[in-house]
Amino acid sequence: MIVPVPGAAVTLRALKTYLRGRGLARFMLPDLLTVLDELPLTSVGKIDKRELRRRLG
């Protein structure tokens, strides 16, 4: 899951190409890309992983 900067269009292919150029091994590359407007946060300002899992599932 990513939150791109305003006006940016991100595709899974472009993300994989970028990450391969940064030295990531093929098995470490994502198989799925979910674009969000913003990351859900808990009451203390941390990323809410439970909410992210709920959205993915």
Image (tube, rainbow, N blue to C red):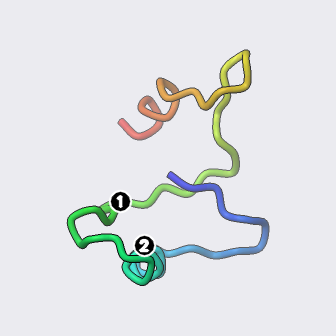
Which type of secondary structure does the marked residue at label 2 adopt? Answer: helix
Residue denoted by label 2: 12
Residue denoted by label 1: 32
Q: Residues within 10 Å of mark 1 (few under 14, many from 20)?
A: few
Q: Residues within 10 Å of mark 2 (few under 14, many from 20)?
A: some
Residue 53 placement (x, y as % from top left): 42, 32
In the picture, measured across the screen, residue 25 lies left or right of residue 20, that is left
The front one of 21 and 32 is 21
Quick check: marks 2 and 1 in contact, CB under 8 Å? yes
In the picture, measured across the screen, residue 22 lies left or right of residue 3, that is left
Q: CA distance from mark 2 to mark 1?
A: 7 Å
* 55 over 48 or under it: above or below: below
Q: Residue at the front extreme? A: 23
* 40 over 14 or under it: above or below: above
Q: What residue is shown at x 34% (from left), y 71% (from top)?
A: 24
Q: Residue at the top extreme? A: 43
Residue 4 placement (x, y as % from top left): 66, 63
